[in-house]
Image (tube, rainbow, N blue to C red):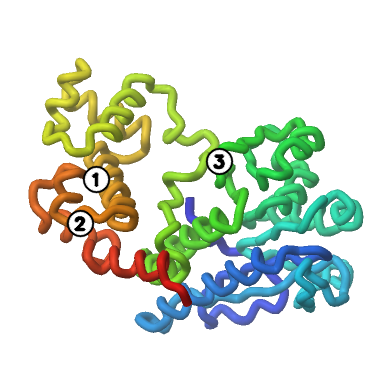
Amino acid sequence: MDIYNKSMAINKNNDAQLKQLQVGLVIYQHVLATSLTLPLEMLSAGEAFARRYDKSTIKLQTQLVSQENKAITSRAGIQFLPDITLNNLRVNETYLPDIILVPSLWRNPRPVLKKHTKLIAWLKHCWQQGATLLGVGTGVCFLAESGLLDDHSATTHWHYVEQFKRDYPKVELKPDFFITQSERIYCAASLNALADIIVHIISQTYGRAAAQNVERNFSHEIRKPYEEQRYLEGAVDRHADELIAQIQFWLRTNLSSDISLAELAQQFGLSQRSFSRRFKIATGIRATEYWQQLRIETAKDLLAASNLTIQEIAYHVGYQDQGHLTRLFKQNLTLTPKDYRAMVRKKLFSQN
């Protein structure tokens, strides 16, 4: 699903201006500052990288949104001033960003929720008008209060899971997942999960190269592909095809095997054509692509956490020569395995 969508907003300029990605970041008392500053810095870095190569790229516009026109103090004591105040909007005036980020709060969110009925109603209105909502940690409670998550999947910070279940029994909480996606509503259980969603948004908006650049500069070693972590409501990656699920398990546990996919299909009693069709329907990607992704992720883990040579790692993940693994790394990460290992270990073990 494409995150970027056109929305009408106040202070829109004429049609000749550059296309914009308007991101509204909600602020309220006791907000966790890092759940605001991290996505702001990552999105800005993604835009800057893309603009370096294409001056006509989508322009990022970020604004802080508050219910009341006053300074907001974060848990850390940092003050934020709103750019948009909902209470100050005139009757016929509205602000409809493309993406709205609802950050996490420190401790119990219920007292803050009670004071922000207008903000909650605004979130629901924006979603109905086509906006994408992104809730982080206990900030997901704002989305639950709006009713938008009723009968839909969500996740939240692990510390608040039991209370969330009691407060919002209609929400299909998925506490084992750090990321959930339901139509245009994304939930992140932690700051790391938020970073993964932001990388995903950057990739969709500014391209894969920009996303990889941001990924390398914001703790690359702990990132995993967004698609591999999320619970996507109604998606085929949590599918009901038990035979394909068995094949996926076999692939995950036999990375070093030199068996062909045609032979694997035969081993499970399927024709190659039926296997290819069912695998794509169940998972959303081709079997060759799935197996390659598994091998690359395993190689990344081994480069970061083991002293195996690159040739030994290539063998371990099913490639007979180091050159094949190097080509795949350059293609997918724009780095060689040697460079990836050096970068990750520098970040992991640096004393600075």
Local crowd at mark 2 within 10 Å, few (<14), some, or many (≥20)?
some
Task: Estimate how packed mark 3 is, as few (under 14), some (14 to 19) or many (20 or more) residues with alpha carbons within 10 Å.
Answer: some
- Mark identifier at residue 292: 1
Residue at 55% across, 53% down? 193
| Mark found first going from the N terminus, 3 or 1 | 3
Residue type for callout 1:
Gln
Residue 39 placement, left or right of 326: right
Instruction: Relative to 39, say whether 230 is above or below.
Output: above
Q: Find numbered disc 3 in the image and state the secondary structure of the residue it sits on.
A: loop
Query: Which residue is disc 2 drawn over?
Result: 328
x 29%, y 65%: residue: 340
- Of the residues shown, which amino acid type is indicated by label 3? Phe
Residue on which disc 3 sits: 177
Q: Specify whether residue 128 is in view.
A: yes
From where the camera sits, is residue 8 visible? Answer: no
Residue 106's label in the rendered image is none
Left or right relative to 176: residue 94 = right
Instruction: Answer whether labels 3 and 1 touch (C-beta < 8 Å).
Output: no
Task: Name the amino acid, label 2.
Answer: Leu
- Bin the neighbour count of mark 1 within 10 Å (Cα to Cα): few under 14, some 14-19, many 20 and up: some
Q: Earlier in the sequence, mark 3 or mark 2?
A: 3
Residue 27, horizontal then vertical, whole percent? 76, 67
Position in image of residue 87 (x %, y %): 88, 68
Q: Are marks 2 and 1 in contact (CB under 8 Å)?
A: yes
Residues at marks 2 and 1, CA–CA distance in whole angstroms: 9 Å
Q: Residue at left 65%, top 67%?
A: 34
**Residue visible at 76% across and 41% down?**
147
